[in-house]
Amino acid sequence: MKRLLTGLTMALTSLTVAGAASAADSYPERPIGVAVSYGAGGATDFQARIVTMVAGNEDLLGQPIYIINKPGAGGRVGWNWLATQADNDGYTMGAYNVPHFIAQSIKGGVKYSTDSFEPIANWGSDPAVFVVGKDSEFNSMEDVVAFAKENPGKLTLSGAGLFVGHHIAALQIEKACDCKMAYIPTKGGGAAAMKAVIAGDVKAGINNLSDAFRAREAGNVKILGVADLERNEEFLSDVPTMMEAGLDVDNSSVNFRGLMVPKGTDPAIIETLAAKVPAMFENARVAKRMKAGGSPMKIMTRDEVLKMWAERQETLEELLKGL
């Protein structure tokens, strides 16, 4: 009897392993969802829809990708859900934003960290920029700093949440100019933050280059500075960096975007995605649409993203101590 039970156990184990291998081999067999931790219309949502639009091509994943918006608390709602409730069967991915989710995990109060997810690939690199309404009295970062110094706490500033790239840039600007601004995290992400600037609800805002580019093209805002090490020659060649404006602000707030899956996803499925997704990002139709939308691309493989996450973790731990 003991031998019989042992034999049955081994047979069942073999069937389970074979079944799992078969499922991974045939992956994907149905559409894949991507959870975006921000609302519809913002830069992450806008770009996620573009970079995944060719997923159904036979030479790529062969299945379409659809977007699941889970906004709230600067991304915390969506990433908490992905880390603790989403299935890890490969049919639910998530869009990541760095420094956002890493900075939030460092500050605490969330249920995720870099250990909660497995990166697949990176599609973009979107610097934070300083924006004001088209009729604003401010025409340069020097104007902004002068006002902030003369009126401590009265320069209201919108952004997509706490400890996202926008907030980090705001904190760095405050430290660099030794002045106080009133940063106001808005509900609804970057799209809502930009609307607050355009409507005149705030004096200024920190937003993504891609959102700001489209708003400037529409004639709604002025862009006064970019929080990066170099000017963005492709989209904003006329806009100086913060350092050019005399502010010691580096590229720590640059928003890297890409796809990840929950921890525990089958390594074979991760391998399939890691092989196919960068090619999806490189598609000519995707590149054309991204450029038309003022969205800078920076395609990175899974190994490159793992390295970037580790480097940003170290940088942000040190940076947030000082802020």
Image (cartoon, rainbow, N blue to C red):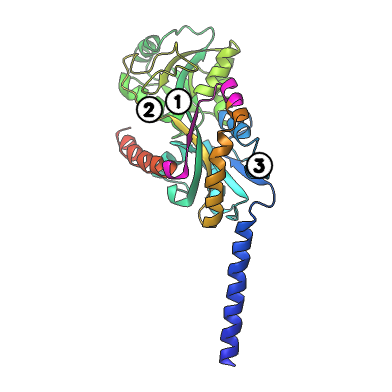
Give the residue at x 59% y 86%: 5
Q: On the picture, is 196 further left or further right than 105?
A: right
Q: CA distance from mark 3 to mark 1?
A: 26 Å
Q: Is residue 265 visible?
A: no
Question: Residue 32, percent across and down?
Answer: 65, 46
Question: Residue 73, percent across and down?
Answer: 53, 38
Q: Amino acid at mark 2?
A: Asn
Q: Is residue 183 visible?
A: yes
Give the magenta range.
Answer: 288-304
Q: Amino acid at mark 3?
A: Ile
Q: Secondary structure at mark 3?
A: strand
Q: Label 3 neighbourhood size at 10 Å, few (<14), some (14-19), many (20+)?
A: many
Note whether 132 is above or below 254 in the view shown. Answer: above
Q: Observer-nearest residue: 23 or 5?
A: 23
Q: Observer-nearest residue: 131 or 230?
A: 230
Q: Mark 3 sits on what residue?
A: 65
Q: Quadrant of the C terminus?
A: top left
Q: Which mark is residue 228?
A: none
